[in-house]
Image: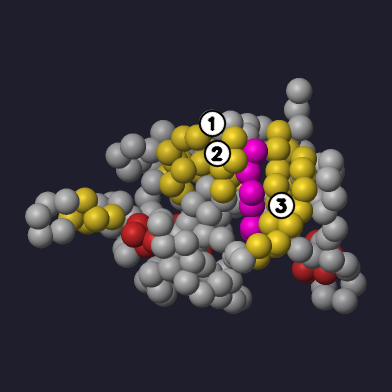
């Protein structure tokens, strides 16, 4: 499973600072967020603070990169969730920020920047661009809530994509308050990093 969302074409991006559950529990690339109601002291370079989205109301966008952290950091490439390690290793191009989730900057002996920590992360604004994404819901809400009562999700071209109660893309509209992201499934596939969806803006 990839440690990032792959940008294929056209996107608006902004640097944001994760707050709330994103800081204490971590996140996976492709996690959807909303703008935080409170405004903490932002790290240098962050344009806004964001918190985990439950799929209802306004959707700001999704976080493009890992790494993902708990405090203290479990491992340097920690593609993790609360119940399992998602994938050993990971995309090392972005792992350099995973040394210390709380440290904003780190320098080597010659004064060269080595890491930025996880205080600032790239968010792709909703309804813009085309992406290949590896982290999405594979079971419906009923199956996740009470195993054996639901079913696996099926993704087909032109399916509208929503955000689950856990902040991940899903083809299921889990409740009347769950709004369409503005993205459609273009196609599905599998490669060496796992199963993926190619998604694109579906709003004219």
Compared across the picture, whether 104 is left or right of 153 comes to left
State the CA–CA distance, disc 2 to disc 3: 16 Å
State the CA–CA distance, disc 3 to disc 1: 19 Å
Image quadrant in which the N terminus is located: bottom right
Near-viewer residue (173 or 86): 86
Q: Earlier in the sequence, mark 3 or mark 1?
A: 1
Position in image of residue 10 (x %, y %): 58, 31
Q: Earlier in the sequence, mark 2 or mark 3?
A: 2
Position in image of residue 2 (x %, y %): 56, 61
Identify the residue under disc 1. 12
Q: Are marks 1 and 2 in contact (CB under 8 Å)?
A: yes
Near-viewer residue (192 or 143): 192
**Residue placed furthest toward the left:** 110
Within 10 Å of disc 2 (Cα), the crowding (few <14, some 14-19, many 20+) is: many
Q: Circle 2 sits in a helix, a strand or a loop, which is it? A: strand
In the image, what residue occupies the spot 50% across and 35% down? 13
The label number, if any, that marks residue 197 in the structure image:
3
Q: Circle 1 sits in a helix, a strand or a loop, which is it? A: loop
Identify the residue under disc 2. 124
Q: Are marks 2 and 3 in contact (CB under 8 Å)?
A: no
């Amino acid at each position: 499973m990839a440690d990032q969302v792959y940008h294929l074409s056209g996107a608006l991006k902004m640097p944001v600072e994760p707050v709330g559950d994103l800081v204490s529990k971590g996140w996976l690339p492709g996690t959807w967020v909303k703008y935080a109601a409170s405004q903490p002291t932002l790290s240098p370079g962050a344009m806004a603070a964001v918190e985990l989205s439950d799929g209802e109301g306004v959707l700001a966008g999704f976080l493009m990169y890992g790494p993902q952290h708990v405090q203290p950091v479990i491992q340097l490439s920690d593609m993790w969730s609360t119940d399992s390690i998602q994938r050993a290793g990971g995309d090392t191009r972005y792992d350099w920020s995973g040394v210390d989730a709380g440290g904003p900057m780190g320098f080597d002996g010659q004064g060269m920047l080595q890491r930025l920590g996880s205080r600032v992360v790239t968010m792709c604004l909703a309804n813009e661009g085309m992406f290949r994404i590896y982290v999405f819901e594979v079971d419906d809400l009923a199956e996740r809530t009470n195993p054996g009562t639901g079913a696996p999700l099926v993704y087909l071209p032109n399916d509208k994509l929503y955000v689950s109660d856990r902040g991940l893309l899903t083809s299921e509209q889990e409740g009347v308050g769950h709004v369409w992201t503005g993205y459609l499934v273009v196609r599905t596939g599998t490669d060496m990093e796992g199963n993926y969806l190619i998604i694109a803006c579906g709003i004219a």
